[in-house]
Amino acid sequence: MIKRFTKGDHSIFHGDIVEVLKSSHIKNGTVDLIFADPPYNIGKNFNGRKDRWSSRAVYMKWCKEWLELAIAKLKPTGSMYVMAATQFFPDFDLLLRSRIEILSRIVWAYDSSGVQAKNNYGSLYEPILYCVKDKYNYVFNSQDILITTKTGAERRLIDYRSNPPKPYNNTKVPGNVWHFSRVRYRMEEYEVHPTQKPKVLLERIIKASSRKKSLVLDLFAGTFTTSTVAKEQNRKSIAIEIDEDFVKIGLRRLEIRRSYKFQKLEKQKKPYIKKNKKSEDENVIISKGAKILPITKKNRKIV
Ligand SMILES: C[S@@+](CC[C@H](N)C(=O)[O-])C[C@H]1O[C@@H](n2cnc3c(N)ncnc32)[C@H](O)[C@@H]1O
């Protein structure tokens, strides 16, 4: 059964992806931008729901079904970003290249302080396929996503090839390797979900590939990062999610509901205990004249 929640320009569909896309809720040819961050088939635990299919073929058959339904929702000028696990990226690439134009194969790279693989090279990136329906007619607001260059004006270099010489540009359009850290549980935006995507990642995608009032469709909403950013950026949004607890995150983040089934919707507490003031102070370094001293009972007196 599909449940719909709407307020203003933002809707949530609580239900199965294929069922929602097959229903008449979202008309074909109406969506400007799709973001697809599906279960990766790598054994994550989505609130008790499986992230493991019986074989690669069975997983890709399911992906093909929702991908084809999703592509039909796009306007002729529409764009789509699809994330995948590194090991399934080639399958997605082969599947999509015959149905839509793949313009970039993006690497979202991050560092990890956690335990990494010991018998091979641990995975420190996630691939994103950037696709458009028509490679001659699509939205790409390059000026809205400029980043600062490391060379050029930041180092005050002068371009002597131009006449007269002038300072190098200090901004550029990002390339296809993106460095954003993952959402850590101490971050303000953290929600209780195993694979939350950072807002900065969606900001770049939404700013580049949609305009104000465009319709953004998130196929696997999770913590509803996509719709949250879409709302902040003045876009319309539709999000699909099968899990009721995750839908509650969306209802709260998008301010569609204050309560659900007679319960107030509140952000779940972050599962860590804050250091108390005293123990934080003990780690602080203070300076006395030219000397740097750790705070100890004795040094406190000097201060
Ligand atoms: C990788 S997560 C998405 C994370 C999201 N992009 C975020 O930033 O939080 C995939 C989500 O798809 C949901 N999901 C799994 N199977 C689904 C299905 N058949 N229909 C709709 N949603 C599904 C899971 O509950 C999970 O929250």
Image (tube, rainbow, N blue to C red):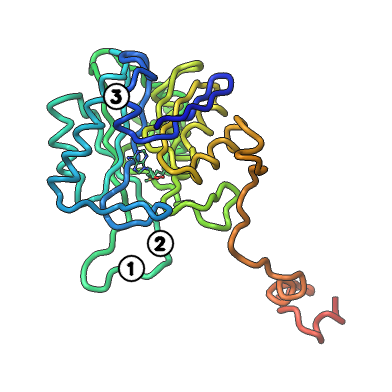
- Tell me the number on the disc at residue 22: 3
Counting other residues with Cα less than 10 Å from the Cα at mark 3, is it few (<14), some (14-19), or many (20 or more)? some
Q: Kindly indicate whether the residue at mark 1 contacts the one at mark 2 (C-beta within 8 angstroms).
A: yes
Considering the numbered disc 2 on the image, is that residue within a helix, a strand or a loop? Answer: loop
Q: State the residue in front, 179 or 245.
A: 245
Q: State the residue in front, 248 or 182.
A: 248
- Residue 243 in the image: above or below residue 66: below
Q: Position of residue 192 (x, y in %)?
A: 52, 53
Q: In the rendered picture of this protein, how many numbered marks are placed on residues? A: 3
Given the image, on which type of amino acid does mark 3 rest?
Lys
Q: Position of residue 298 (x, y in %)?
A: 81, 86
Q: Is residue 189 visible to the viewer in this orientation of the structure?
A: yes
Given the image, on which type of amino acid does mark 2 rest?
Ser
Indicate left or right for 225 with 111 as reference. Answer: right
At 44% from the left and 45% from the top, the residue drawn is 197
Residue at the spot of label 1: 116
Q: Position of residue 208 (x, y in %)?
A: 41, 26
* Displayed-image quarter of ligand 1: top left
- Residue 222 in the image: above or below residue 55: above
- Tell me the number on the disc at residue 112: 2
Q: Position of residue 83 (x, y in %)?
A: 30, 41
- Residue 53 in the image: above or below residue 33: below
Counting other residues with Cα less than 10 Å from the Cα at mark 1, is it few (<14), some (14-19), or many (20 or more)? few
Task: Answer with mark 2 or mark 3, whichever residue precedes in sequence.
Answer: 3
Indicate left or right for 238 with 134 as reference. Answer: right
Indicate left or right for 266 with 167 as reference. Answer: right
Indicate left or right for 31 with 227 as reference. Answer: left
Considering the numbered disc 3 on the image, is that residue within a helix, a strand or a loop? Answer: helix
